[in-house]
């Protein structure tokens, strides 16, 4: 079996330096710990515990960083590395009711803290995907700052290196030459005194890569950083923040060049609307307009915007119209609860987006439970609009049954446009790079495969294993709907919101369905792009049996060799 595609530049053999760790206990919630001579201190984590705030001090007792870690009290779930880089003292404040936990000096973390010159990232997870991007360890959510340059796809992402639940937002970084095999790169952004590093975007400007991100401190402001080495390292702009606001939710800048006005455009998520700014130099930004009042779904906070043109082809190939798509991720408010990606189709003049649909029309890019924070790569080749999504849902993302890591990205998808009735919709198809890894035909499903189902007007597909765990998919050609039932898919008990049936309109007939299976996920696509559905599943063993009524299935292995 192919090992994880993510690799570190350093050798990953574990060499531990064992030494007795004796904390300086200063109170019922306060302790200090002097560090030892090693590259990393390996901190033991217990996920059910309260956060411990750790101030990292150097040899002059000046604070160089503050991190939040769920230090183990009575058991260890896993370890996370902190690179010491001259740190000499950890000033640790525990939270929660210590009367129920015992004395700080007796916590198990002091017995389990270790020092090492390396950190072992060997996969220890039954559910880690084989061909979807995941972090080597720790927590990941929104994809950030994606761009293509010199044959390399760059993916940054919201990252917590100090635990497998949301906290300590950094930008992680991975690169790929084919959108399937990903290599882990050094961490890009750490929090600073303006706040944690929330979501944002990157643009290429000559030989530079410029990143825009939200600094999430007491208030959310917009910052930027510049890279002169193709996005591998960045220097934060000395004039940060570049945009401020008195709004509590003011984040996720997405920037692009608009040629007709010769200006840069930024779209920002602000509460339940999107705000548009423009700039000639990427530093001084002018507010232009807002969009969102009364349009689409407003059951949650709007986040992670994107704005881009797509071409609609008419009945004849030379009949082409350009329309603009505004992507608006929302949490909660998704069609089946929790987070999801909605979008609007219309026009854009460099200053204002105008939606062509009636205000109450809501359009969803994916009708599964696990498709959020969808954004596109800047500068994708051949005028493609390639997107990735975070493959989870805020209702249960912190509780899914993995611990070494949490969360994966969807496979890469290409977007287009199609019409049904009086409306224009976004089409979603697996990116062509997925065809390049389609392997030989096999008889039965495997833990990582692609299944092509030729459909009739009424089709039922059941994936199952010997444990009786199953996922049932139903296509109703008369009603023009496709549904996926994961209520019996395996481990569904970690959240009441997880077991569910999701249903999508198909906007016409489905002739062929493409299913991508990868250990803990099923992604279903109408081959023509009119329907997409992404759902996580956690079977105790892989689905190795398929039954199809009203159709025919062809199964392909995924060829993971580079």
Image: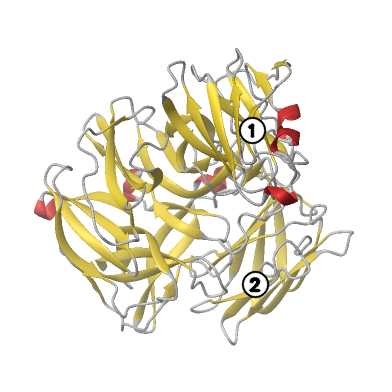
Above-or-below relation of 262 to 191:
below
User: Whole-percent x and y of residue 27?
Assistant: 62, 37
Q: Which residue is mark 1?
A: 561
- Circle 1: element type: loop
User: Whole-percent x and y of residue 495?
Assistant: 69, 65
Q: Residue reaching furthest front?
A: 27
x 69%, y 27%: residue: 113
Give the mark, 1 or 2, whose residue is nearer the N terminus: 2
Above-or-below relation of 536 to 483:
above
x 71%, y 37%: residue: 78
User: Whole-percent x and y of residue 32?
Assistant: 59, 28
* Quadrant assignment, res 500: bottom right
User: Whole-percent x and y of residue 6?
Assistant: 59, 33
Where residue 455 is drawn, which disc sits there? 2
Q: Residue reaching furthest top?
A: 37
x 28%, y 35%: residue: 225
């Amino acid at each position: 079996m192919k090992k994880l595609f993510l690799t570190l530049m350093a050798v990953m053999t574990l060499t531990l330096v064992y030494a007795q760790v004796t904390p300086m206990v200063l109170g019922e919630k306060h302790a200090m710990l002097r560090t030892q001579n090693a590259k990393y201190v390996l901190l033991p984590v217990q996920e059910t515990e309260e956060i411990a705030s750790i101030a990292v001090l150097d040899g002059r007792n000046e604070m160089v960083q503050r991190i939040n870690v769920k230090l183990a009290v009575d058991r260890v779930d896993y370890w996370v590395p902190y690179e010491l880089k001259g740190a000499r003292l950890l000033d640790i404040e525990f939270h929660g009711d210590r009367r129920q936990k015992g004395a700080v000096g007796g916590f198990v973390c002091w017995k389990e803290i270790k020092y090492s010159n390396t950190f072992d990232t060997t996969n220890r997870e039954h559910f880690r995907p084989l061909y979807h991007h995941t972090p080597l360890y720790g927590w990941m959510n929104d994809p950030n700052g994606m761009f293509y340059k010199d044959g390399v796809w760059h993916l940054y992402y919201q990252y917590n290196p100090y635990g497998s639940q949301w906290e300590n937002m950094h930008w992680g970084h991975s690169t790929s030459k084919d959108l399937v095999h990903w290599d882990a790169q050094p961490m890009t952004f750490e929090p600073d005194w303006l706040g944690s590093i929330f979501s944002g975007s990157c643009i290429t400007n000559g030989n530079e890569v410029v990143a825009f991100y939200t600094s999430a401190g007491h208030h959310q402001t917009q910052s930027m950083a510049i890279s002169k080495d193709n996005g591998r390292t960045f220097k934060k702009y000395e004039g940060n923040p570049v945009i401020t606001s008195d709004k509590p939710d003011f984040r996720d800048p997405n920037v692009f060049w608009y040629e007709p006005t010769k200006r840069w455009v930024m779209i920002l998520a602000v509460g339940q609307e999107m705000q548009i700014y423009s700039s000639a130099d990427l530093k001084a930004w002018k507010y232009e307009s807002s969009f969102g009042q009364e349009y689409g779904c407003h059951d949650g906070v709007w986040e992670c915007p994107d704005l881009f043109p797509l071409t609609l082809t008419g009945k004849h190939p030379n009949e082409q119209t350009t329309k603009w798509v505004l992507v608006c991720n929302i949490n909660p408010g998704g069609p089946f609860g929790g987070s999801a990606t909605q979008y609007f189709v219309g026009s854009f003049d460099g200053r204002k987006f105008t939606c062509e649909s009636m205000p109450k029309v809501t359009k969803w890019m994916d009708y599964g439970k696990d498709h959020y924070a969808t954004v596109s790569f800047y500068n994708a080749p051949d005028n493609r609009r390639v997107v990735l999504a975070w493959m989870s849902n805020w209702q249960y993302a912190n509780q899914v049954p993995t611990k070494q890591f949490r969360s994966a990205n969807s496979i890469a998808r290409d977007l287009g446009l199609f019409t049904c009735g009086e409306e224009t919709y976004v089409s979603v198809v697996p990116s062509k790079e997925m065809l390049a890894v389609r392997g030989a035909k096999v008889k039965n499903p495997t833990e990582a495969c692609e299944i092509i189902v030729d459909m009739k007007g009424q089709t039922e597909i059941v994936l199952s294993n010997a444990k009786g765990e199953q996922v049932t998919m139903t296509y109703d050609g008369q009603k023009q709907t496709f549904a996926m039932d994961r209520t019996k898919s395996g481990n569904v008990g970690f959240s009441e919101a997880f077991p569910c049936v999701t249903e999508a309109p198909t906007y016409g007939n489905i002739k062929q369905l493409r299913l991508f299976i990868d250990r803990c996920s099923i992604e279903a696509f109408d081959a023509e792009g009119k329907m997409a559905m992404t759902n996580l599943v956690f079977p105790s063993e892989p689905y190795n049996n398929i039954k199809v009524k009203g159709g025919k299935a062809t199964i392909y292995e995924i060829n993971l060799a580079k």
